[in-house]
Image (cartoon, rainbow, N blue to C red):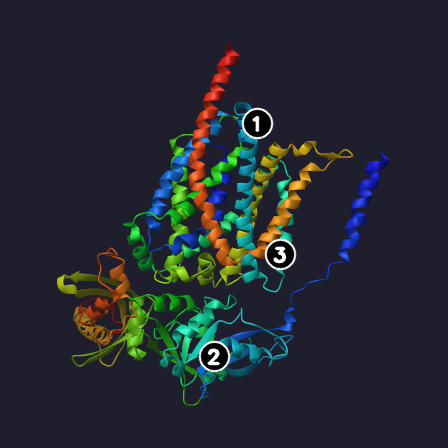
Amino acid sequence: MPIKQSKTRLIPLILVPLIFLLSGCEFKDIDKDVFVSMMAIDLSDDEDKPYKITLKLYVPTSSFKQSPEPEYSYITQSGETFSEAIRLLESYSDKELEFGHSKLIVIGEELLKENKSKEILDFLLRRPDIQMISWLAVGRPSAEEIVKMLPQGENAAYPALFNYFDDIGTESQYIVTTYLFDFRRRIGENGIDPILPIIEINKNKSHFEINKSLVLADKKEPHELSTVFTGIFNMLSGNAETADLIIKEDGHYFIAKIDSMNTKYKVTVQDNNRIKIDIEVSLIGFISESQHPLETQNLSYYNQLFEKYEKKILKDFFNEMTDKGYDPIGFGIDYKSRTLHNTRMSNEEWDEAYKNAEINVTVIPKLKSTGTIQ
Amino acid sequence: MSRYYYYLILINMVANIIASVPTILLQYHKDGSVSSMALAVVTGTILVTIYTRFFNAFPGMTLPDLLMKTTSKWFYKPFIFFLALMWFVAGLITLVTFIFLLVRYLTPEMPVFQISLLLIFSIIFGCFMKTERVLYTIELILLITFPLILFIFYKAYTSKSIEWDFVKEAALYVNQLPNVNSFASCFFLFLGVANLFIFNRFFTKKQNFKWMHIAFIGIISTLTLFTTYFIPIGFNGFENIDDLVYPWITTSDSLRMEFFMIERVLFVFLLFYLGIAFLSILIHWHVSIEFLKYVFKLEEIKFRGFNLGKYIPILFFIAVSLLFVRVMNEYKLFRISIYFYNTLIIFFPLLIILFFYIKRSMKNADKAKQN
């Protein structure tokens, strides 16, 4: 069978030389890439080039032992558009900028006040390499300062700022976590407003302080939520799983540690487009600190105090929200999810009605113990 | 029913997520997509039942076999050629969509040409396999990728970030008249059964097809459509959902698995879907090539004893695909997909008339034989 043999020999003879045509990996090696760890977007002083972008880049090191301290490099550029700034930034770095691993985007407070969130969002969404699960935050006084700050006790290669948001590190009740996709859906929808955490630096420049938040709304000034209200927002929206609540009532001053909570709300519309919002919060926990001695048999009394005080704070929170017309919890979409689209009121009507909404707060206090001492 | 039968149906349903079906559905999110979906589940299940019953009556026979027995040459030759063209286009649309996705997300620095060739070659090798081997390949790849895709769906459903209020809001748009384009794209999910035109060759024994099996298909299709349409809405909101060019890619990017090997689900999702898309194109093009074999009697074209004929359509396949990748942009592809799906909703129900005709003539032929 000479013909068949020559055929089987022919195939490798053709295939083997083809290997030499292969040019190796055409994409860039990993050491020719530099990874962006976070991005800061600010308003610049230059009016022609309003956007200032600062990138925090990981400095590649061969081993952890060689550089146990965190090391970063920073590049900054202003531009008329984001892409122009990025294009120039690429010329400042000897390596290819890789945005795929950037996990946090800090936006300067000034820029948000200019109502530029739509433009920022467009840039962030249009690029396929920016993660939809990156966190968004507001930097005060400016995003650049936040990004450039190295807090005490920061680990190498994992920026401390990530720990605040990723639910693995701290689980403070005052930290709002907003993902990029969440921000996008809240901006587009009428009936739920975007909320962003505010990152501040303490006076000694030794650590961050993240316990306030900013509610944005269309065509309105961003509204800042205080620390207490941020905590309440987190509780109501299910962001926080545990919370410490202070009770100052009737001469008592104690702190309830809540380890489980449950929030239900229901929007009902009466005739003449009057809205009634019923909110039911049940708080289960124990007392963790008190200025006066407590007695176990008085637990139901403490529960009463607790209910009274929490109701007051919750009412304050909702009054502030409805009076100014901000809706970070999403009562609007709750209403939309219960009524047919052709029978419900228009967005403008809803906004108007929301401002005059009647709010009923019910707190179900369930303090189970006074702690290990009476 | 044989499990291979379900694979054929399942692949077409699952693969749609990567094709333009969700994009079309979400485009008409305020113009009757929900009711179209409901309508498509009913009509689609009926179509699947009729098709399966028909082919079950003729075990082991392909549609071209049946046509050759019952119709004359002037009819079946152009008709089968038309079918071949249709199946080729179905595969082509999936291919181009996936190539665009790969270029956009996975390998932005690689030339489109190279990616296309890479994919086309691997599919073409599959197309030459025997029909039963194609089914074995499907089983193998499905076994690897499908559990992981189900896991991603499970993660999406149980995610804390999914906002069910948006889903409810979207579902309340049910009181609208169905929309043709949405209906057509949903209907496409059920057309996996049409692959029996060739794959019936494999099912040589009469199968048991009862109400239970029909109900099973109905449930699976409902779940698929629900996932396809409502999960992206839950993650990306309702109002601006039509902005998204690839809703499912954005959705998978919105998922976060902090304790998984890769935090960003997008890449895992794309890789698994590469497998599913490969299977979908493989099935369509295999059917297309088999059709062409009937039309042109390709096996008889020989060159010095070497069977050359088989390879002729391949050249066309490669050339047309490469041309298509070059000419298309996302918008054109989207429009073409809509037109294509719309022709299918007219064509496939009409085929049922042909089935009745075939069934009658076959019965008459049987009777004539007995006499």
Question: In front: A178, or B101?
Answer: B101
Q: Chain letter of disc 2?
A: A
Answer above or below: position of B17 versus A358: above
Q: Between marks 2 and 3, how big is the CA–CA gap?
A: 35 Å
| Circle nearer the viewer, 1 or 2 | 1
Name the residue carrying label 1: B73
Q: Name the residue under label 3.
A: B115
Whether callout 1 and callout 2 share a subunit is answered no
In three-dimensional space, the C-alpha distance between marks 1 and 2, rounded to whole angstroms, equals 70 Å
Reading the image, the residue beneath label 2 is: A40
**Total number of numbered labels?**
3
Across and down, in percent, residue A275 comes to 18, 65
Q: Which chain carries label 3?
A: B
The vertical placement of A372 against A152, above or below, is above
Mark 3 or 1, nearer chain start: 1
The crowd level at tag 1 (other Cα within 10 Å; few <14, some 14-19, many 20+) is few
User: Looking at this rendering, what residue extends furthest in the bottom direction?
Assistant: A204
